[in-house]
């Protein structure tokens, strides 16, 4: 779905919110400054249909957006439903399923944790193992690594740019999103 030539591109930003409010405000300001219509629930920039649940509204926003930016930090996010999957995880899965034009930022600590936990998480034949995991300052939940795996192992749109700090994340945003017309051409 492409926007009309005179309409701004709807860019959804999906992220857990815990301890990242100032950073997400910066991301919102930068992307809005470039001319995007930013869809971000944590900033109140997403239509909330009162007939839908929180996660239904978030998934509807993924469907509505033209492009998608996922931010993977060490926090898994708010869990919903009987399977207790985070809304952020559901949004990223939906963006992949709908083959949205998408980019991902992943905190450097998550990339390192993924490498360190690889041999615990998977057996030699590639099957996923179960093991006990206690929350740490780096990872709130081991499923953060599942999100990272799903993003990086998807066939297309699997670029997950590591960032160490806000400066490096904002540099990535500048390089990717400072020219909305380039993004508009990708949407065709």
Image: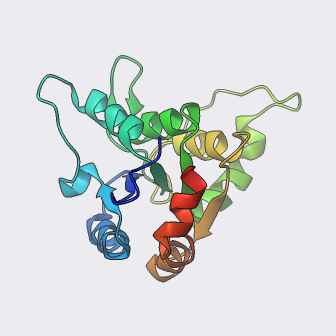
Q: Is residue 34 left or right of residue 70?
A: left
Quarter of the view holding residue 18: bottom left
Colouring style? rainbow
Residue located at (58% from left, 38% from top):
99
Residue extending farthest to the right is: 125
Residue 102, percent across and down? 55, 51
Q: Is residue 132 above or below residue 11?
A: above
Front residue of 141/154: it is 154
Residue extending farthest to the top is: 82
Residue 182, percent across and down? 56, 67
Tell me how many marks there are: 0
Residue located at (26% from left, 33% from top):
57
Q: Is residue 168 above or below residue 62?
A: below
Residue extending farthest to the left is: 50
* Residue 72 visible in rendering: yes
Residue 10, percent across and down? 37, 53
Residue located at (40% from left, 35% from top):
63
Quarter of the view holding residue 56: top left
Front residue of 112/42: it is 42
Residue located at (30% from left, 31% from top):
55
Front residue of 144/14: it is 14
Front residue of 180/114: it is 180
Residue 106, percent across and down? 56, 60
* Residue 18 visible in rendering: no
């Amino acid at each position: 779905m492409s926007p009309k030539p005179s309409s701004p591109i709807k860019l959804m930003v999906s992220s857990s919110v815990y301890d990242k409010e100032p950073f997400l405000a910066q991301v919102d300001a930068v992307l809005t400054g470039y001319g995007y219509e930013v869809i971000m629930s944590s900033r109140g920039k997403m239509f909330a249909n009162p007939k839908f649940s929180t996660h239904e509204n978030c998934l509807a926003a993924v469907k509505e957006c033209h492009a998608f930016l996922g931010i993977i930090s060490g926090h898994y996010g708010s869990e919903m439903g009987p399977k207790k999957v985070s809304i952020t995880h559901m949004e990223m899965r939906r963006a992949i399923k709908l083959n949205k034009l998408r980019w991902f930022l992943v905190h450097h600590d998550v990339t390192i944790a993924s490498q360190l936990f690889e041999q615990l998480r998977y057996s030699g034949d590639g099957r996923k193992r179960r093991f006990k995991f206690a929350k740490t300052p780096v990872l709130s939940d081991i499923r953060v690594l599942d999100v990272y795996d799903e993003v990086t192992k998807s066939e297309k749109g699997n670029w997950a740019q590591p960032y160490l700090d806000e400066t490096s994340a904002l540099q990535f945003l500048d390089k990717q999103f400072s020219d909305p017309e380039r993004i508009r051409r990708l949407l065709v």
